[in-house]
Amino acid sequence: STYLIGSPAFDRIKITRNKNECILLINVHNNSPTNIYIERVLLNGKILSTFPFIDHINDLKCSNNNNQSNIQLDFFMSSTPLLLYDK
């Protein structure tokens, strides 16, 4: 499944999955009533290249085979909208 990413309504959330074997940690930086636009998203410290989409299997799957038992998403918010097609 592929998800469309929207502006988070929280500053930080921890989601425990797979009977406590996997943690999805979402941090939101610069979150405020005026910073409603997503400037960028990091997935485990790297730019999420598929933004504004995220793939459940490729991006959010926890696996002990590749030593990825935790996943971290960092949202960086801004008061200015990002023009995706101005690249």
Image: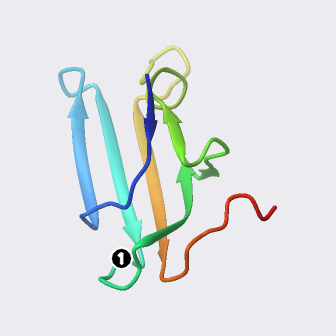
Residue 36 spot, x, y in % from top left: 39, 74
Q: Residue at x 20, y 28 (%)?
A: 20
Q: Residue furthest top?
A: 65
Q: Nearer the viewer, residue 2 or 63?
A: 2
Residue 64 % position (x, y):
45, 18
Give the left or right position of residue 47, taking residue 34 as reference: right
Tag 1 secondary structure = loop
Picture layout, residue 71 above or below residue 34: above
Colour option used: rainbow
Q: Is residue 84 left or right of residue 38?
A: right
Give the quarter of the figure containing the C terminus: bottom right
Residue at image coords 43%, 35%: 3
Relative vertical location of residue 80 with respect to residue 75 in this rendering, above or below: below
Residue under the image location 66 percent in, 67 percent down: 83
Q: Quadrant of residue 18?
A: top left
Neighbour tally class for label 1: few under 14, some 14-19, many 20 plus, Cα within 10 Å? many
Q: Position of residue 53 (x, y in %)?
A: 53, 41
Residue closer to the observer: 41 or 53: 53
Residue shown at the point (50%, 37%) measured from the top left: 54
Q: So how many labels did they put on this image? A: 1
Q: Is 8 drawn above or below residue 81 in the view shown?
A: above
Residue at mark 1: 31
Instruction: Report which quarter residue 60 is drawn in.
Output: top left
Quarter of the rendering occupied by the N terminus: top left
In front: 31, or 64?
31
- Residue placed farthest to the left in the image? 19
Vertical relation: 6 (above or below) 24:
below
Residue type of the residue flagged with mark 1: Asn
Q: Going by the image, does 79 lie left or right of 9?
A: right
Query: Residue 5 at x, y = what percent?
Result: 43, 48
